[in-house]
Amino acid sequence: MKYLLIQAQQDTASAVDTLSRSYADKWEAAKEIEEAGVIMQAMASYDLIFVVLAVSLIIWFVLLFYLIRVDKKVSKLEEQIELKTLEKNHEA
């Protein structure tokens, strides 16, 4: 019984190793980085975590800008509604 469990663990480990070996060339940097574009050169020169950090920060700043813009528009609409209700109250 123990042998079967150990064999199953080894089979799982070997499956993971074959997966990482088959995609290893896709995860590595370009061999001829000088011929790559500017963005690829920047990504290759820094750790990839900094690229991920930069992309996530850009996304957060865009979301923040969008929320501020929507808040301003909603505030403007609220003021217009308040002015219309005041005008109706003065007319009546």
Image: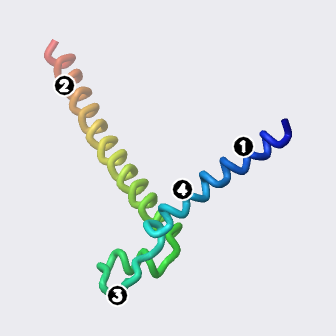
Residue 2 in the image, given as x and y percentages of width and height: 85, 40
Say which label, 3 or 1, has the lower sequence index.
1
Helix, strand or loop for disc 3: helix
Between marks 3 and 1 in the image, the one whose residue lies nearer the viewer: 1
Between marks 1 and 4 in the image, the one whose residue lies nearer the viewer: 1
Residue 50 vs 8, above or below: the answer is: below
Say which label, 1 or 2, has the lower sequence index.
1
Residue 65 vs 92, above or below: the answer is: below
In what quadrant of the picture does the N terminus appear? top right
Q: What's the distance in space between the residues labelled 4 and 3, CA to CA?
A: 29 Å
Residue furthest left in the image: 91
Residue beneath label 1, please?
8
Residue beneath label 4, please?
19
Between marks 4 and 3 in the image, the one whose residue lies nearer the viewer: 4
Q: What's the distance in space between the residues labelled 3 and 1, CA to CA?
A: 45 Å
Q: What's the distance in space between the residues labelled 1 and 2, CA to CA?
A: 74 Å
Name the kind of residue labelled 3 in the image. Glu
Name the kind of residue labelled 2 in the image. Lys
| Quadrant in which residue 89 is drawn | top left
Q: Residue 46 versus residue 91: which sits nearer the camera?
A: 46
State if disc 3 and disc 2 touch (CB < 8 Å): no
Q: Position of 63 compared to 10: left or right?
A: left
Residue beneath label 2, please?
84
Residue 9 in the image, given as x and y percentages of width and height: 73, 46
Around disc 2, counting alpha carbons within 10 Å, would you say few (fewer than 14), some (14 to 19), or many (20 or more)?
few
State if disc 4 and disc 2 touch (CB < 8 Å): no
State if disc 2 and disc 1 touch (CB < 8 Å): no
Say which label, 1 or 4, has the lower sequence index.
1
Residue 75 in the image, given as x and y percentages of width and height: 30, 38
Q: Position of 81 compared to 14: left or right?
A: left
State if disc 1 and disc 3 touch (CB < 8 Å): no
